Amino acid sequence: MLLANVESKIIGEPNLIRFQTGRRHKQWDKNVVAIGLSSGFLEPLESTSIHLIQSAIVRLIKLFPHVGINAANATEYNQQANLEIEQIRDFLILHYHVNERNDSAFWQDLRSMKIPESLAKKINLFSQTGNIFREQEDLFLESSWLQVMIGQGIVPQDYHPLANTISEIQLKEMLDSMKKIKQNPLEKIPSHDEYLMRICGA
Ligand SMILES: Cc1cc2nc3c(=O)[nH]c(=O)nc-3n(C[C@H](O)[C@H](O)[C@H](O)COP(=O)(O)OP(=O)(O)OC[C@H]3O[C@@H](n4cnc5c(N)ncnc54)[C@H](O)[C@@H]3O)c2cc1C
C-alpha cells in the first residue's frame, strides 16, 4: 500500500517500527524524573516526542528543587505533564475519529470509538458554532484544529456574527494580500529537490 503510493524511484525497503503507546502515572517520582521515551509515547502522526522532551526539560528547570525534593514541585510537574500529553492525545484522536474512510473496518471502528470528553466538547462546539478555543498551553494552535476538522469534513452549522461585518470583496482582498505576503518569500526558496541537490549533489 505504502510502496504503491510512492511516485518516484524506490530507494529502500520500508522499515516496520512497532511501538506501544502510554504514559507513566507519575513522570516525576521522588528523586527520579522520566523524560522522553522513558516517560511515555503517543504516536508518530504529529511527531511530538522531541517537543515533549524539550518541554519536559524546561518544566524541570522551572521546578528544579533547591534543597532536597519538594513533593509540591513533583505534583505540579506531573499535573502539567499530564495536561500536556492529554491535549496532544485529543488532537491525535481527532484525526482518527473524524475520518471519512469506508474502505476498512479499522477506519469505521475508529469513527465509533469512545473519545475523551474534552475532545467531544471541542468537536461539538466547532460543529455547532464554528468556534475553536485554544486551551492554555495546548501545543496545537486554533489553525491546526481548524485544518483537521474542516479537512476531515466537519462543516460548522453556524459562524460568528462578526464575520457579517466585512463584505465578500473585503474578505477576498484580505485573503489576496495574505497570499501575496506568503508568496513573496516562497518564490525565493528552492524546492525540496533543488535544496537536496545543492547540499548533497557533489
Ligand atoms: C524513524 C523515526 C522518526 C521519528 N521522527 C520524529 C519526528 O519527526 N519528531 C519527533 O518529535 N520525534 C520523532 N521520533 C521520535 C523521537 O526521535 C524519539 O521519541 C526520541 O528520540 C526519544 O528520545 P529518548 O532520549 O527518550 O530515547 P532514545 O533516543 O531511544 O535514547 C535512549 C538511549 O538510552 C540508551 N539505553 C537504553 N537502555 C539502556 C540501558 N539499560 N543502559 C544504558 N543506556 C541505555 C539507548 O541506547 C539510547 O541511546 C522519531 C522516531 C523514529 C524511530
Image (cartoon, rainbow, N blue to C red):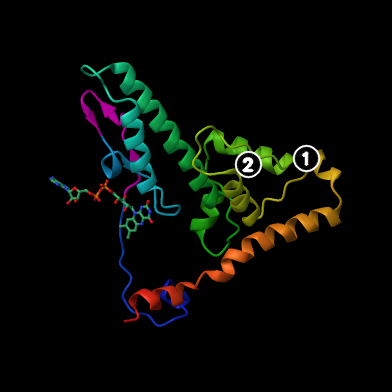
Q: Where is residue 122 in the image (x, y as percent from the top left)?
A: 61, 38
Q: How crowded is mark 1: few (under 14 residues within 10 Å), some or many (20 or more)?
A: few
Q: What residue type is labelled 1?
A: His
Between 21 and 179, the residue placed more toward the observer is 179
Q: What stretch is highlighted in magenta?
A: 20-33
Q: What residue is disc 1 on?
A: 160
Q: The C terminus appears in which quarter of the rendering?
A: bottom left
- The residue sitting at 55% across, 70% down in the picture is 188
Q: Where is residue 133 in the image (x, y as percent from the top left)?
A: 62, 36
Of mark 1 and mark 2, the one earlier in the sequence is: 2
For the question of whether residue 18 can be seen, the reply is yes
Q: Where is residue 194 in the image (x, y as percent from the top left)?
A: 45, 77
- The residue sitting at 50% across, 41% down in the picture is 90
- The residue sitting at 49% across, 47% down in the picture is 92
Kindly identify which numbered label has been placed on residue 43.
Answer: none
| Image position of 133 (left or right of 82) | right
Q: Please say if 73 is above or below 17.
A: above
Q: What residue is disc 2 on?
A: 123
For the question of whether residue 25 can be seen, the reply is no
Q: Where is residue 7 in the image (x, y as percent from the top left)?
A: 47, 79
Q: Please say if 60 is above or below 101.
A: above
**Mark 1: which secondary structure?**
loop
Between 30 and 68, the residue placed more toward the observer is 68
- The residue sitting at 29% across, 25% down in the picture is 64
